[in-house]
Image: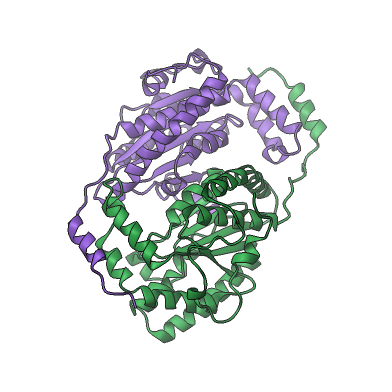
Chain colours: A purple, B green
């Protein structure tokens, strides 16, 4: 592909205060080519992602606890579904576990906000994907004032402690905010209203949320700043161009897998002995 | 593709006694062409499966409770993983929920055998896939004499009642036994022992299970006969040819979706009113 730079380095949010206004949603950092080339580059990543993923999946037969957790956040229409289809879809579904977090159920509300998250952490060997996540609890929770500011403050700390514990348990976190512009969101919402095959994706409440755009951007900035740790850093993925968004997340996944330095597990049995057992077996009757 | 016949009709097990010896594992019912044509036919199914699946997924925004549950059973190496990758993998992972059932955990053993199954039933709008299932409890349970014959008998009835209840709740069941020959299994086990990238798939215990081949075939025959209901019929999918197996399961999925007579949900809001809200909105500052 047109770049060998690390998307992890390029898209990682530097420590300190975050200003999303400084990051161009229409940008394509690390990829100096057009849509057709970007889609080809994404397709080319498929075999590499598939092999790395299978090596991770193979570790289930060892005592390794390593796994990946991709956290996808972003405003409505930012393309979480598209990333699931086109980037995560490159992987073998056998080794992928996707969880979509909606408004909490009554049962979930009876527990602390991380309870349902803990229950969805992928098992060793898997790539887990969160379509929305515990970050909703410091985003919509803050914008809609569902919880008091002091509680939001505590949640940032709780999230950092939780993610540190995940990392200690073998989880590599890949946290992505899909960053679109307000203009692009308007176009996408209007497109949904112009296409009967997309009406189902539209909800009048989306426009109410949109009216809070600046408050959401601010909530994202604060949440990212407060939870942008060495252990679990944030990436902001420019998402006005769908093809770049998909390519960037696929690259982040591949790089996370590469970082594990995976290898095929050795046989923990005597190969020749097992072959002989098969070759010399009694008739199966 | 080379056939327009219904794979559902072709592969469905007739009511009554089942003799797996009558079904050629190397067969390719309904497809009178070669591997290359079969792989092309599978790829061609992709767009149709994707659209039907998205229509099912769109129903989540309605009060529909419809969903699909694909149950995959088969001897070791019969290709459940390959079906997940190549057939289920044609669908958008966003709308798919795969559950792999292993030997029950201690917690699971404290409950009735259907408890963990109930917890994994897909939500409305989803295609759920069981990689092994409640059928293990009447297969290995019977062959290994983990439970008494009278209890196995009760389980067939419990399964039928459970599956009827699922159907009443909007679940379309697609039950597939991937049918391989003992010779083909031997080849595949030997191939795993010849390839360092496949050692992880091999377990010496697989050969112990293989030694019980006739008992397993008999357990399958009885289980299929006893649970081959109108509501949740069994399909036996010849699986010695990987490409045919993948194609057949993909066709069964597509046919199940077609049978739902899906359509895009209508808008439950005033389209022009919502467009106007967006076009006339106040600046987002």
Q: Is residue B282 left or right of residue B249?
A: right
Where in the figure is residue B103, as x and y percent of width and height? 35, 65
* Horizontal and vertical percent position of residue B1: 64, 49
Is residue A219 visible in this depiction of the protein?
Answer: no
Q: Residue at x 57, y 34 (%)?
A: A82
The residue drawn where x is 68% and y is 30% is A207
Q: Quadrant of the C terminus of chain B?
A: top right
Extreme residue toward the front, this view: B33
Asked if residue A124 lies left or right of residue A213, the reply is: left
User: Which quadrant of the structure image shows residue A214?
Assistant: top right
Residue B166 lies, in percent from the top left, at: 60, 66
Tell which of A89 and A144 is nearer to you.
Answer: A89
| Left/right of residue B205 with respect to residue B22 in the rendered view | left
Task: Please name whichever residue, A113 or B59, is drawn nearer the observer in this view of the structure.
Answer: B59
Count of number-bearing discs: 0
- The residue sitting at 72% across, 27% down in the picture is A190
Residue B281 is situated, as x and y percent measured from the top left of the image, at 73, 22
Compared to A197, does B42 lie above or below? below
In the current view of this chain or complex, which residue is farthest to the bottom? B150
Residue B229 in view, yes or no: yes
Figure quadrant of residue A34: top right
Q: State left or right for residue A64 relative to residue A14.
A: left
Write the residue at 27% across / 69% down.
B208
In this rendering, the answer to whether A194 lies above or below B258 is above
């Amino acid at each position: 592909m047109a770049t060998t730079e690390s998307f992890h380095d390029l898209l990682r949010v530097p420590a300190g205060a975050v200003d999303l206004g400084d990051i161009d949603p229409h940008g394509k950092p690390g990829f100096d080519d057009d849509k057709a080339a970007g889609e080809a580059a994404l397709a080319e990543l498929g075999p590499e992602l598939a092999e790395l993923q299978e090596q991770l999946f193979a570790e289930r037969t060892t005592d390794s606890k390593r796994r990946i957790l991709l956290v996808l956040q972003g405003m409505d229409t930012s393309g979480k579904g598209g990333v699931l289809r086109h980037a995560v879809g490159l992987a073998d579904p056998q080794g992928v576990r996707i969880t979509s977090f909606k408004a909490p159920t009554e049962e979930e509300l009876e527990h602390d906000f991380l309870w349902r998250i803990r229950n969805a952490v992928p098992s060793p060997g898997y790539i887990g994907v969160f379509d929305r996540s515990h970050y909703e609890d410091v985003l919509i929770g803050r914008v809609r004032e569902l919880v008091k500011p002091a509680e939001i403050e505590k949640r940032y700390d709780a999230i950092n402690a939780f993610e540190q514990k995940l990392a200690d348990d073998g989880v590599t976190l890949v946290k992505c905010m899909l960053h679109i512009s307000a203009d692009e969101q308007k176009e996408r919402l209007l497109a949904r209203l112009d296409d009967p095959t997309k009406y189902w994706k539209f909800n009048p409440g989306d426009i109410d949320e949109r009216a809070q755009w600046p408050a959401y951007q601010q909530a994202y900035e604060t949440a990212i700043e407060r939870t942008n740790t060495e252990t679990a850093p944030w990436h902001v993925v420019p998402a006005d161009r769908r093809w770049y968004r998909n390519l960037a997340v696929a690259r982040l996944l591949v790089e996370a897998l590469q970082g594990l330095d995976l290898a095929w597990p050795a046989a923990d049995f005597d190969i020749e002995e097992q072959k002989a057992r098969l070759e010399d077996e009694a008739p199966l009757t």
